[in-house]
Amino acid sequence: PPQKQDIDLAPLIQRVVDLEPRLEVQVRPGPKATIRVDAAQIEQALINLVHNAVDAALETQGNVTLGWHEKGNCVEILVEDEGPGIMNPANLFVPFFTTKPDGSGIGLPLSRQIAEAHDGTLVLMNRDDRQGVQALLRLPR
C-alpha cells in the first residue's frame, strides 16, 4: 500500500526526466501542484511511462513531452511521444505481454496498479493531434 505524503509535483517530474539518458524529454510545466502520494511509487510509474515513450520516440526520431495540469480535484500528468502509436491496445495492460525484444511486460501493468492504489487512473491512447501515444495518469490531490 502507498505510504502517502504531500509532494510537490514539479521536482518529482524533474527527477524522472533527469533519469532518462537516451533522449531529452521536454517538460511542459504546469501549475504549482501538491499531491498526496507515495513519491517512490509515483516516480516508478512515471519512469515506466517515460521509458516506454522514449523507446517509441527513438523508433521514429520523435520527441517526448511530460507535463501536468489540474482538472477538478485531480492532477493529470501527460506523457506524450511521437512514436509509431499503439498497434494492439487490447494487450497494453496484460502482464508479461510485450512487443519489445528485451521487454518484460510488467511496466504498464505495474504503473496502472500504482495509479489505482492511489485512487487514480492510467489510460494510454493514440494521439489525435499527430502520430504517437499519450499516457494520462490522473491522481487525486
Image (cartoon, rainbow, N blue to C red):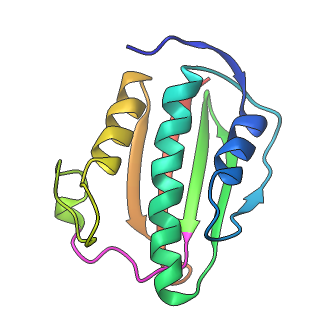
Q: Is residue 41 above or below residue 44?
A: above
- In the image, the segment drawn in magenta is 81-88
Quadrant of the rendering where the C terminus is positioned: top right
Q: Nearer the viewer, residue 32 or 26?
A: 26
Residue 8 quadrant: top right
Where is residue 95 drawn, in percent x and y?
17, 47
Q: How many marks?
A: 0
Q: Residue at position x 63%, y 77% from top? A: 63
Query: Is residue 23 within the magenta segment?
Result: no
Q: Nearer the viewer, residue 35 or 47?
A: 47
Q: Nearer the viewer, residue 40 or 127?
A: 40
Where is residue 84 drawn, in percent x and y?
41, 83
* Whether residue 128 is visible: no
Q: Residue at position x 39%, y 31% from top? A: 114
Where is residue 50 drawn, in percent x and y?
53, 57
Q: Residue at position x 17%, y 62% from top? A: 90
Q: Is residue 82 above or below residue 92?
A: below
Residue 4 quadrant: top right
Quadrant of the rendering where the N terminus is positioned: top left
Image check: 136 left or right of 93?
A: right
- Magenta portion: prevailing SS class: loop
Residue 101 quadrant: bottom left
* Whether residue 109 is visible: yes
Q: Nearer the viewer, residue 83 or 101?
A: 101
